[in-house]
């Protein structure tokens, strides 16, 4: 094999242009297409940088292998660069002005007929995941992974310039439940004991602050055994940051500066100053805590306006402390379409969906018209932002159900009607989240963020004094960074005093034994002098997904899992041998 051992690759396929005219080059890659025109053979040679056309005379002794090549064969070619004649150039190809006149070709590796052509997006995702290594040859995925690399480099550059130190934390660690199920790893040398794969390096990065590291970051692998969505995976990467002697605004500034640096580096765009909105305002205006600001529509509160309504559904909801909200959509809908929207609202917990329509002739109609005269209907319509023709959708229910239903309709209809401004990315800080929420299933208070989040200063006394009547009103020093309706980062100022951390665990209903078993090491660490500290973590996969303009994080991960947390390529998870189980002291039972 003369190539590789003697003739080394001189260029990548996609980087050659007319400046290389008359140069001798050595290229290596995959045969994208082969066209036999009798006296000449044309090969489009592909590598990660792109395509280049190679012209070969198969009658030459050095080029006889050209007739034996097929798609996806790996070949090496030596030849000379020449500029294509006018009329023969391909403006759609980066290398379209030139071609390579091949003087020598060698087949480095043959290929079976592939189950699909790399880059064929008509192929089912199941097949593409099974043969992920073939799909990785597609320009689409290679561009996404290259952009992921660029983002990671930009993050490292940006944080290094601000004095942060990159430190790796353990993958095998202690189970410290943080909301989702842990992935457990049995210990062979400690029978009956288990490690847990980290859901995040939360306690570890706080211990680094106690250790005096001051500014830490890591691109960390995290694992959560939870139900999946298009933008979630059982294992994922997060950009993890923690810093000492800071408060909320300090962390938010570091995070904002980093996003500004990344967007400038990757997209050449200045994201400007980012707006800040409280959790309460976000919920009232948009129905969710991660609103997509590319959609102009907002929810309008009708609770007081309809409190004394003759329509009992509205008055009852208002009377029991519920919420009535409306959403104006500048479009007309058929009865069948409204029925489908009603089902969607019910799936989000709402009991129904009322509507008011105004057509192009200014005629108003509504199924609740018998409870209101025309002027009242028009007042409601106008109060929701209705102008000229369109539709107002109204939900009356508990606050959470009302917000969830209308927020879902807002997103769904905006995408259906093309009302999303995709010309730029829209960022938003959401702050002042609730510290605690009551779980009816568990019959106890749970942390909205995680149990290490500090309460706002004015709420500290109520937490320490265990005043449960105040728990619903406690606010956290927590903050989320939202982009285009996705939460791309979340963080908080941490509890740095042992008595406050103990009060938080008490509020969550943990017993002394549970606290010692799960967090004893951490509680003890807090007693040895802990600086005020806080941090933030970005979901790297979701961040790259937005920068690549795709809707699924599987598109930006080299080897992703399916929605059932399986790897179709490697057929994982899979059974293990009886001997391995015996060695670990594990017996399987039928479920």
Image (cartoon, helix red, strand yellow):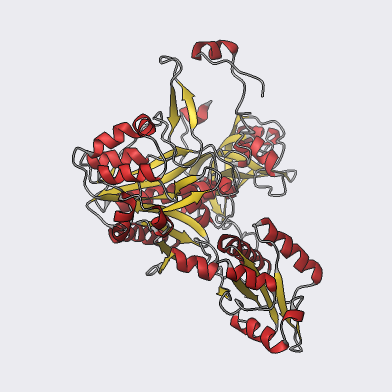
Image coordinates of residue 428 in percent, x first then y, are: 44, 65
Residue 318 showing in the rendered view: yes
Closer to the camera in the image, 100 or 519? 519
Q: How many marks?
A: 0
Closer to the camera in the image, 281 or 231? 281
Corner quadrant of residue 581:
top right
Image coordinates of residue 76 in percent, x first then y, are: 56, 35
Closer to the camera in the image, 491 or 506? 506
Image coordinates of residue 285 in percent, x first then y, are: 52, 71
The image shows residue 304, relative to residue 114, as above or below, that is below
Q: Quadrant of the C terminus?
A: top right
Corner quadrant of residue 360:
bottom right
Residue 414 showing in the rendered view: no
Horizontal relation, residue 24 to residue 71: left or right = left
Closer to the camera in the image, 361 or 134? 361
Image coordinates of residue 270 in percent, x first then y, are: 40, 67
The image shows residue 221, relative to residue 194, as above or below, that is below
**Residue located at (72% from left, 86% from top):** 373
Residue placed farthest to the left in the image?
529
């Amino acid at each position: 094999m003369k190539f590789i051992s003697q003739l080394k690759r001189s260029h990548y396929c996609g980087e050659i242009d007319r400046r290389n005219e008359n140069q001798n080059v050595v290229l290596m890659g995959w045969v994208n297409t082969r066209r036999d025109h009798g006296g000449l053979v044309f090969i489009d040679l592909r590598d990660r940088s792109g395509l280049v056309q190679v012209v070969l005379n198969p009658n030459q002794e050095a080029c006889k292998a050209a007739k034996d090549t097929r798609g996806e064969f790996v070949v090496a070619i030596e030849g000379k660069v020449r500029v294509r004649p006018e009329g023969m150039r391909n403006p759609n190809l980066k290398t379209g002005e030139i071609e390579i006149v091949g003087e020598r070709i060698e087949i480095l590796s043959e290929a079976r007929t592939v189950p699909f052509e790399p880059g064929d997006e008509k192929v089912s995702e199941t097949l593409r995941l099974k043969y992920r290594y073939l799909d990785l040859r597609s320009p689409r995925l290679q561009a996404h992974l290259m952009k992921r690399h660029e983002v990671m480099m930009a993050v490292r550059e940006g944080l290094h310039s601000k004095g942060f130190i990159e430190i790796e934390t353990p993958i095998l660690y202690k189970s410290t439940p943080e909301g989702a199920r842990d992935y457990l790893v049995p210990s062979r040398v400690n029978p009956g004991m288990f490690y847990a794969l980290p859901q995040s390096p939360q306690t570890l990065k706080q211990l680094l602050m106690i250790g005096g590291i001051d500014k830490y970051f890591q691109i960390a692998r995290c694992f959560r055994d939870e139900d999946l969505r298009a933008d979630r995976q059982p294992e994922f990467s997060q950009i993890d940051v923690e810093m000492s002697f800071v408060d909320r605004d300090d962390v938010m500034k570091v995070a904002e500066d980093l996003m500004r640096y990344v967007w400038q580096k990757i997209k050449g765009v200045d994201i400007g100053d980012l707006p800040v909105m409280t959790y309460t305002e976000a919920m009232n205006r948009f129905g969710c805590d991660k609103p997509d600001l590319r959609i102009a529509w907002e929810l309008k509160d009708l609770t007081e306006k309809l409190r004394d309504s003759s329509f009992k559904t509205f008055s009852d909801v208002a009377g029991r402390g519920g919420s009535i909200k409306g959403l104006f959509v500048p479009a007309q809908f058929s009865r069948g379409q409204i029925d489908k929207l009603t089902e969607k609202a019910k799936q989000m917990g709402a009991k129904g969906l009322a509507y008011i329509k105004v057509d192009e002739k200014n005629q108003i109609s509504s199924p609740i018209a018998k409870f209101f005269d025309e002027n009242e209907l028009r007042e409601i319509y106008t109060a929701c932002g209705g102008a000229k023709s369109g539709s107002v959708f109204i939900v009356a229910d508990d606050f959470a159900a009302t917000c969830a239903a209308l927020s879902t309709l807002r997103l769904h209809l905006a995408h259906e009607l093309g009302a999303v401004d995709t010309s730029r990315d829209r960022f938003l800080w959401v702050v002042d989240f609730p510290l605690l929420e009551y779980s009816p299933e568990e019959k106890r208070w749970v942390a909205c963020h995680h149990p290490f989040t500090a309460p706002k200063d004015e709420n500290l006394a109520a937490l320490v004094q265990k005043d449960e009547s105040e728990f619903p009103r406690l606010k956290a020093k927590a903050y989320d960074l939202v982009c285009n309706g996705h939460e791309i980062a979340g963080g908080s100022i941490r509890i740095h005093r042992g008595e406050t951390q103990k009060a938080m665990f008490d509020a969550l209903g943990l017993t002394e034994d549970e606290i010692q078993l799960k967090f004893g090491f951490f509680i003890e660490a807090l007693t040895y002098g802990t600086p005020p500290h806080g941090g933030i973590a970005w979901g790297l996969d979701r961040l790259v997904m937005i920068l690549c303009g795709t809707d699924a994080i599987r598109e930006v991960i080299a080897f992703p899992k399916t929605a059932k947390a399986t790897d179709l390529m490697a057929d994982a998870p899979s059974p293990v041998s009886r001997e391995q189980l015996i060695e670990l002291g594990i017996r399987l039972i039928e479920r």
